[in-house]
Amino acid sequence: MASLNQMELQNLRHLIGKTEIDYQKLNTYAGQAVDPQIKQAFTKSAQDTLNTKQKLMTFLC
């Protein structure tokens, strides 16, 4: 795999940070949801966001 330049690395770190924040927010929303369907939607979105973060992290290796 080709190495990342400084700009790409900075952008990647920004995206990883943003996905972590999104994951935390979605988990909070899921925890506060009363309706089971809404809770499930937030939980799925949180898991999808975590998967995206993990994929982005692979570019750092």
Image: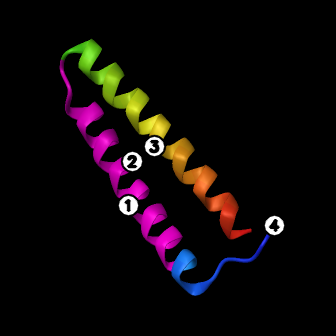
The magenta span reads 10-34
Mark 1 and mark 2: Cα distance apart in space: 9 Å
The residue positioned 67% from the left and 77% from the top of the image is: 4
Mark 2 is on which residue type?
Answer: Tyr
Residue 56 in magenta stretch:
no
- Of callouts 1 and 4, which one flags the residue occurring earlier in the amino acid sequence? 4
The reply, left or right, for residue 15 in relation to residue 36 is right
Amino acid on which disc 4 is placed? Met
Q: Which of the two marks, 1 or 2, is nearer to us in this view? A: 1
Which residue position is annotated with label 2? 23
Residue 10 picture location, percent across and down: 49, 79
Residues at circles 1 and 4 in contact by the CB criterion of under 8 Å: no
Please name the residue that numbered disc 3 is placed on: 49
The spot of residue 57 in percent (x, y) is 62, 60
Point out the frontmost of discs 1 and 4. 4
- The extreme bottom residue here reads 6
Image side of residue 32 versus residue 59, left or right: left
Q: Are marks 1 and 2 in contact (CB under 8 Å)?
A: no
How far separated are the C-alphas under marks 1 and 4? Answer: 24 Å
Dot 3: few (<14), some (14–19), or many (≥20) neighbours within 10 Å?
many
Q: Which residue is mark 4?
A: 1
Q: Do the numbered discs 2 and 3 sit on residues whose CB atoms are within 8 Å?
A: yes
- Residue 60, percent across and down? 67, 69
The answer to which of marks 1 and 2 sits earlier in the sequence is 1
Q: Are marks 3 and 1 in contact (CB under 8 Å)?
A: no
Q: Which residue is mark 1?
A: 18
For numbered disc 2, what is the local secondary structure?
helix
Which mark lies nearer to you, 2 or 3?
A: 3
In the depicted structure, whether residue 10 falls above or below residue 14: below
Q: Which structural element holds mark 1?
A: helix
SS type, badge 3: helix
The foreground one among 12 and 5 is 5
